[in-house]
Image (cartoon, rainbow, N blue to C red):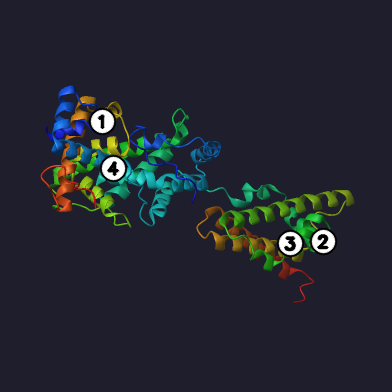
Amino acid sequence: MTTDTLARLVDDEPQPQERAHLEGCEACADELSALRDQTEALSMLPEIMPPMGDWEVLEARLRSDGLVRDPAPLSKLGLARTPAWMPAAAAVVLFLGGGAAGAGLVSRGPADATRVGATVEEAAAAVRDAEQRYVRAVSQYRSILAAEGTDETDVDPISRYAALEHLVSVSQAAVRQAPGDVFLNGFLASALAERDAAARMVSLTDDNWF
Amino acid sequence: MASANPFPSNHRDGRRHRSLCMSETPRHDTERELIRFAAEGDARAIRTLYDRYAPRVYAVVRRIAADDDLAQDYAQEAWIRAIRALPTFRGDARFSTWLHRIAVNAALQSLRKAETRTRREGPAPEDVPVAPAHADSLLRKRLERALDGLPEGMRQVLILHDVEGYTHDEIGDVLGVTSGTSKSQLFKARAKMREMLASLSGSVKEHGAEAWST
């Protein structure tokens, strides 16, 4: 039998005369068996990992083609839409321990931040947790201000700085777990910028005694 | 990502696309969300899809291209096309199947363009590329090497049928040939592959040699 015929018999049932030949010809039977094994082996070929740096090249192309957009981390959290006084207001709550959410956050110092989980998921969860606490604190302080009729602009830059410093610590720990994570890096960059702005405000306050 | 392989190897009995072999898991809901976000350009969603499917896309493209450098270009082209087309993905087929088809088409079209260019510019130097050396078995290396050395038409049909599990009708659609031509090419490819594996093994017997075995 020709090799082409044997290759066909890998998929198709042999005709009666072909079956008869195979039963009597050990060489052809062996060759058919080898072709079947070869085909089976091909079907088991594994996936192949792309070369190192493939994603980075692709990402650059996607960006240049305008196919990727990064959500601004703070706007994704809704923080960018909060009134300017709110982060500072929340910081006051945090600093004074005036609410349960704030107290919880304050009690977790930078040392805790470095103990963010061992996995990327845990690190990201820690950041989300910090974000949620921050937002809750903002809302809580807004309620307090509304109840007491306090001037919203009269907030404590030092407290705001402290709260942002905590966010930076948690974000840094998360980025250490996932250095390539675009969202976490973006969030860290935003938190750093906010913290530095808060630091400049602190330096301008009258009670800047240090 | 260390999650379950979305493209488990097919077995000949099943005769299904590898890309169709994904088991029904709750992951599908997550994947729908991922695809929706990726279609909107969300960088994290796109990255997650890439992490999940890049090895499968790269494998089929690499085998069609038979060249590492070309494979990377073709795979990138496939991803660009897929991300661009994501808003048109309606979910009629599995995402893996849809993506796989885009990858195959992208590789084939890129190959044709490259050939047209080569014809204009003259032949490239003789060089039979070798598959990347992972910690593969000798058998796997021989298979990849023999695949690379097959004539292009045979290689494409053999990869699509025996490696990827396409039917002859599907191969006809993709390659623009009849299913009869696909069958004929497949049988020739298997026979040629058998010869090449035998010569690669260096221990050829006249008949029935286990040339591809270790």
Q: Earlier in the sequence, mark 1 or mark 2?
A: 1
Q: Earlier in the sequence, mark 1 or mark 4?
A: 1
Q: Is residue A89 left or right of residue A125?
A: right
Residue A34 x %, y %: 21, 41
Q: CA distance from mark 1 to mark 2?
A: 75 Å
Q: Nearer the viewer, mark 1 or mark 3?
A: 1
Q: Which residue is mark 1?
A: A11
Q: Earlier in the sequence, mark 3 or mark 4?
A: 4
Residue A37 visible in the shown view: yes
Please name the residue shown 53% across and 59% down the image. Answer: A178
Subunit of label 2: A
Q: CA distance from mark 1 to mark 4?
A: 14 Å
Please name the residue shown 50% across and 58% down the image. Answer: A180
Q: Which kind of residue does numbered mark 3 sit on?
A: Arg
Q: Residue A184, which numbered label? A: none
**Disc 1 residue crowd, few under 14, some 14–19, many 20+, Cα 10 Å:** few
Q: How many marks?
A: 4
Q: Residue A42, which numbered label? A: 4
**Disc 3 residue crowd, few under 14, some 14–19, many 20+, Cα 10 Å:** many
Q: Nearer the viewer, mark 4 or mark 2?
A: 4
Q: Residue A160, which numbered label? A: 3
